[in-house]
Image (cartoon, rainbow, N blue to C red):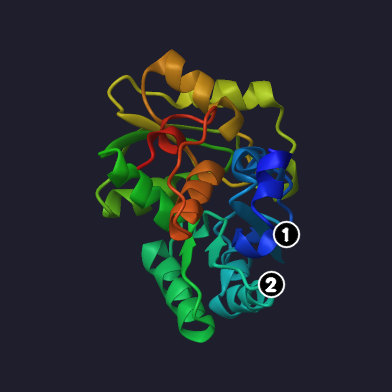
Amino acid sequence: MLQKLLKSGGFKSIKKIGFIVPSSNTVLEPVTSLMAVQLAHRVSVHYARLRVTSITLDNQDVGQFKQEKMLDAARLLSDAGVDAIVWNGTSAGWSGEGFQADQKICEAIERELGIPASTTTLAQKEAFDALGISTYSLAVPYVAGPTDSMLKTYAKEGYDGLSSAKLDLSVNAEIGQVPFGVIRQLILDSDAPDAQSIMIGCTNLAGALWVDELEKELGKPIFDSVLVTFWKALRMVGITEDVQGWGELLRSGK
């Protein structure tokens, strides 16, 4: 990988992706780096943090994702000359504000900064559509409120959650510390035989590490939030080549 990077001539020629990250997340950055290493000669990833500490439907927690706060983080990323800005968080899916909340954030970023923008929730919709998915099982670390809200949000968009499994966690820092084996079992517990796919809904849960293995075991695509966000970001900067070892979506070139 180093030789490919050196042959690129310099970082000026490499596409730059800017991710807005929940402040208490500790998973998405190392996982994204692992996925990105195969493309180190073509893309680099950069981060700005947005204060997020807990995941419930309380007004205080939902208020963590206000548009102006997102814009503040996006402005910092724009200083680095990034080619795309993506909110790497699932808030629109579970907060009750729905897809429109993320669409408005993206419009505000693009209007002010002139940089293409997207989010995890919008990326998940595109990933479902890319593989022709309309039914799924949901695996999340959350408590009941956000879990049920996420199922309802996606149902309004035409995606039917047939089953779910959760870990009953609301403190985001604790979500990032869930053992890998527990995450694997969560994914298996969520599965329904009739579901076309599984969605792992959270960008602070290391579900992406199991996607490739469990897709082969279960015979269906698995969409992890960190993975689909990276997939979308790559396509925003014109990169569609296969990334091996991370499941069908990144391998498909769609």
Q: Residue drawn at (28%, 54%), measured in percent from left and top?
A: 156
SS of the residue under disc 2: loop
Residue 4 placement (x, y as % from top left): 65, 42
Task: Kindly report the distance in space between the C-alpha atoms of the residues bearing marks 1 and 2.
Answer: 19 Å
Q: Is residue 11 left or right of residue 245?
A: right
Of residues 12 and 252, the one drawn nearer to the viewer in this rendering:
12
Q: Is residue 51 visible?
A: no
Quadrant of the snapshot with the N terminus:
top right
Q: Which mark is on residue 80?
A: 2
Q: In the rendered image, which residue does mark 1 sit on? A: 23
Q: Residue at x 53, y 42 (%)?
A: 227
Q: Which numbered marker is on residue 85?
A: none
Q: Amino acid at mark 1?
A: Ser
Q: Can residue 158 be spotted in the picture?
A: yes
Circle 2 residues within 10 Å: few <14, some 14–19, many ≥20 = few
Residue 50 percent across, percent down from the top left: 68, 66
Please rate how many residues cluster around mark 1, counting C-alpha atoms within 10 Å: few if below 14, some from 14 to 19, many from 20.
some
